[in-house]
Image (cartoon, coloured by chain):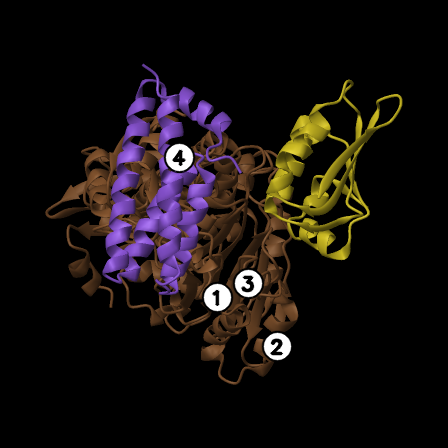
């Protein structure tokens, strides 16, 4: 490809030798190279052979006319711009129009003026180079775009493995997220907790494209790891916030909402930082509770300033909580009107069948903007009975170290620790050092959590469990628990852990003692079989999982024995 | 009007340099052939052939700054396009006359 | 769309005014507005009186300014917000980081 502005190769086609000679000399004189043809056919052949950058064509030629030659040359040139200038003494409009129809770019009339010829050659050469540059750039952009799409597909594959390892497909969730929403910086993840509950997070990173998407990876990783290890929502939020603060640029952050769902007590704990108002639809009363964002988005505050609060909301079965990115109310029609809150609320007002709510919202937004969009994520979370889940608990990852089989350990947790630290993941992590025991992580988590909360709430904090029995007592109970915890000056909880090998498995002996006054466990043990209230259930639960549950001292010490074997299912049989 | 715009031709001569003589000879030879062929076209009542010949002659003449001859060729071209061969006959005579003069003048510009 | 910055005579206060949409396209001019000051002001005022829209990149830019102005010790007022603009700031609870009037 010849691109020097000075010199180009020019094809001159004219059947008149005189005219050909003159034009040839003029063009040569101006520093270009010339190839000459005596008719249209020759011109086309020479074009193929010599690939000149510009063509000067006589109109009336034998064998093949200039019109036809121009047509063929333009076709051969393809995407490259090869200017064709017709040499003519024709003056009538019809002939000139025909020249343009044939693909001619300009005319040069006889007698040839060297000045005009030069001006035209230069002008068309500039245009030709500009066209060439544009095309090179276009191809480059197309190439970049192709590569970008390939990279996105690759990134999406990795992202899907990390982000979609959870339970977004659970029957109590409905979600909307385009396959490439991650490239808008949207993230939607959900996971079952070892205790049987569920944690859901919907996030929307500031900005768009890869810079926004990139933070979703560490976020999802932390989320899944911590949920599986039994960390609580505030702990996960706090960790995610620190990580985002650490990895995102100062101007980057992640708006989001996290919901911790307890199917047993029908409680949702909700944290919203920077998402638009989220709605809780109470199916029985057909009312809408609006939950506003009360916290700063993730990744802005340093760890010591981050507030790990949340709202506790008691709901009923079939109630639905909706979280969404701002893409819903900010969805725009072709007049740039926002979908807005009024239209969103109207969907709820007009709804007749709650199961259809999610679809109705989706359709309402899509019909408003005229087409589905990438820039929108939302999720519906329904409260359902715990036993409606048939899925097996997801085991905590097995320790990669060939672990300890025969050991004992003890821990003592004191007030400052009890106030701000949840020791369950630490202890669970300890237990997971035993090879094979990871299949039992869900059950062990439940046992540990039960032992710990009994020791803390009824032992150290001296709370009366009957408070919890009242239907709407949960909120009150948790407020009181929080209050007493912050006032706590003395007290302790001790754990003794011991593991021994048994054929095809082992036995874990866990003893928990607290500094509390204890309780009349004989009395409780006696009436336990009839008691179906929440507060009695804890002990029932322990007994159903454990080979032995024994209270001792003044009732402030309990020992359990959990026998396990290498297959979860056969262990299961004994309890159900 | 001058038979040839000699000033313009002078410039062309400078552009053509060594090829100028060859150009003039080519022009004279081609034009002689064209004018002879026009005679034949007239005899054979071939208006299309007449038009093409006159068009080519016109173009060459214009490029050589031989304006009166170009004008005559254009008149003939126009008549041939209208298929009026009758009035062309006297014009061809004029054309031949003018060409003789032009040939003589052109030859005078040749260099050694 | 325009970002203008006026520094008080003693240099102690910098007022940045944003006209039209405040989004990523204003990134450079907003940065220039607070970085090209001779003396570091101790009070910043962001006047959003003529701001019609604010997106998440704008929130990011405000965070950049906050960082530039000393992070937790930054003294930044955001004034004259239109209701829509204010709502966006409040959804993200930016009143915890900035004085919004």
The residue beneath circle 1 is: A265
Q: Is residue A249 above or below residue A504?
A: above
Chain B: its colour in the image is: purple
Q: Are marks 2 and 1 in contact (CB under 8 Å)?
A: no
Mark closest to the chain's N terminus, 3 or 2: 3
**Chain coloured yellow here:** C
Which label sits in the foreground, 4 or 1? 4
- Along the line of sight, the residue nearer the viewer: C50 or A76: A76
A388 displayed left or right of B10: left
Q: Chain of mark 3?
A: A
Density class for disc 3 (Cα within 10 Å; few <14, some 14-19, many ≥20) is many
Which label sits in the foreground, 2 or 4? 4
Density class for disc 2 (Cα within 10 Å; few <14, some 14-19, many ≥20) is few
How many tags in the picture?
Answer: 4
Q: Are marks 4 and 1 in contact (CB under 8 Å)?
A: no
User: From this viewpoint, is residue A53 visible?
Assistant: no
The residue beneath circle 2 is: A346
Residue under the image location 53 percent in, 60 percent down: A324
Residue under the image location 31 percent in, 53 percent down: B52
Tag 4 secondary structure = helix
Q: Quadrant of the N terminus of chain A?
A: top left
The residue beneath circle 3 is: A328
Q: What percent of the width, then of the height, locates residue A525?
A: 39, 63
Which label sits in the foreground, 1 or 3? 3
Density class for disc 1 (Cα within 10 Å; few <14, some 14-19, many ≥20) is some
Tag 2 secondary structure = helix
- Along the line of sight, the residue nearer the viewer: C7 or B67: B67
Q: What percent of the width, then of the height, locates residue A318?
A: 47, 75
- Along the line of sight, the residue nearer the viewer: A399 or A285: A285
Tag 1 secondary structure = loop
């Amino acid at each position: 490809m010849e691109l020097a502005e000075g010199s180009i190769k020019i094809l001159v086609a004219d059947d008149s030798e005189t005219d050909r000679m003159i034009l040839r000399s003029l063009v040569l004189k101006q520093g270009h190279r010339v190839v000459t043809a005596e008719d249209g056919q020759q011109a086309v052949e020479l074009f193929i052979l010599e690939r000149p950058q510009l063509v000067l064509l006589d109109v009336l030629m034998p064998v093949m006319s200039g019109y036809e030659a121009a047509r063929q040359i333009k076709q051969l040139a393809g995407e490259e711009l090869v200017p064709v200038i017709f040499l003519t003494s024709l003056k009538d409009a019809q002939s000139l129009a025909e020249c343009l129809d044939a693909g001619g770019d300009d005319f040069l009339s006889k007698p040839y003026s060297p000045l005009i010829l030069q001006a035209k050659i230069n002008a068309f050469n500039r245009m030709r180079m500009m066209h060439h540059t544009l095309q090179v750039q276009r191809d480059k952009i197309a190439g970049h775009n192709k590569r970008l799409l390939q990279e996105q597909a690759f990134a999406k594959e990795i992202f899907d493995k990390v982000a979609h390892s959870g339970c977004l497909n659970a029957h109590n969730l409905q979600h909307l997220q385009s396959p490439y929403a991650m490239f808008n910086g949207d993230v939607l993840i959900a996971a079952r907790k070892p205790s049987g509950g569920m944690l859901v997070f919907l996030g929307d990173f500031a900005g768009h494209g890869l810079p926004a998407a990139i933070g979703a990876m560490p976020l999802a990783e932390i989320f899944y790891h911590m949920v599986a290890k039994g960390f609580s929502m505030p702990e996960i939020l706090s960790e995610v916030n620190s990580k985002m603060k650490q990895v995102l640029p100062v101007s980057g952050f992640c708006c989001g909402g996290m919901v911790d769902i307890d199917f047993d007590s029908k409680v949702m704990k909700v944290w919203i930082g920077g998402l638009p108002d989220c709605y809780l639809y109470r199916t029985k009363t057909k009312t809408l509770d609006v939950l506003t964002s009360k916290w700063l988005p993730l990744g802005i505050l340093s760890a010591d300033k981050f507030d790990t609060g949340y709202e506790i909301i008691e709901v009923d079965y079939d109630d639905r909580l909706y979280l969404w990115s701002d893409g819903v109310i900010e969805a725009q029609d072709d007049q740039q009107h926002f979908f807005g809150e009024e239209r969103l609320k109207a969907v709820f007002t007009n709804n007749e069948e709650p199961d259809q709510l999610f679809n109705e919202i989706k359709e309402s937004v899509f019909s408003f903007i005229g087409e589905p969009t990438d820039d929108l994520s939302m999720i519906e979370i329904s409260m359902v009975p715990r036993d409606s889940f048939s899925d097996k608990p997801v085991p905590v990852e097995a320790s990669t170290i060939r672990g300890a089989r025969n050991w004992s350990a003890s821990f003592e947790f004191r007030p400052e620790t009890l106030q701000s630290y949840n020791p369950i993941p630490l202890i669970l992590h300890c237990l997971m050092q035993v090879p094979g025991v990871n299949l039992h992580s869900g059950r062990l988590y439940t046992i540990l959590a039960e032992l710990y909360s009994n020791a803390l709430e009824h032992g150290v904090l001296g709370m009366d469990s009957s408070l919890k029995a009242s239907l709407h007592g949960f909120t009150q109970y948790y407020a009181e628990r929080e209050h007493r915890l912050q006032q706590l000056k003395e007290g302790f909880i001790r754990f003794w852990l011991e593991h021994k090998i048994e054929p095809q498995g082992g036995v874990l002996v866990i003893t928990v003692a607290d500094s509390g006054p204890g309780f009349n466990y004989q009395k409780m043990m006696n009436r336990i079989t009839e008691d179906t209230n929440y507060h009695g259930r804890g002990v029932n639960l322990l007994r159903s999982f454990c080979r032995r549950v024994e209270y001792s001292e003044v009732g402030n010490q309990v020992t359990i024995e959990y026998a396990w074997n290498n297959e979860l299912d056969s262990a299961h049989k004994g309890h159900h | 009007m001058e038979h040839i715009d000699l000033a313009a031709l002078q410039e062309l001569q400078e552009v053509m340099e060594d090829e100028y003589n060859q150009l003039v000879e080519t022009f004279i030879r081609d034009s002689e052939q064209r004018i002879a062929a026009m005679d034949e076209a007239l005899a054979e009542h071939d208006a299309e052939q007449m038009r093409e010949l006159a068009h080519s002659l016109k173009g060459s003449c214009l490029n050589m700054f031989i304006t009166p001859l170009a004008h005559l060729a254009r008149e003939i071209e126009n008549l041939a396009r209208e298929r009026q061969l009758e009035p062309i006959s006297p014009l061809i005579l004029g054309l031949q006359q003018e060409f003789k003069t032009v040939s003589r003048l052109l030859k005078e510009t040749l260099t050694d | 769309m325009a970002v203008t910055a006026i520094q008080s005579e003693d240099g102690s206060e910098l007022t940045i005014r944003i006209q039209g949409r405040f989004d990523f396209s204003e990134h450079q001019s907003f940065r220039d507005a607070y970085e090209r000051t001779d003396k570091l002001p101790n009070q910043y005022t962001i006047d959003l009186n003529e701001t019609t829209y604010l997106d998440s990149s704008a929130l990011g830019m405000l965070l950049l300014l906050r960082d530039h102005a000393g992070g937790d010790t930054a003294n930044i007022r955001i004034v004259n917000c239109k209701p829509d603009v204010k709502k966006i700031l409040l959804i993200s609870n930016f009143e915890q980081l900035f004085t919004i009037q």
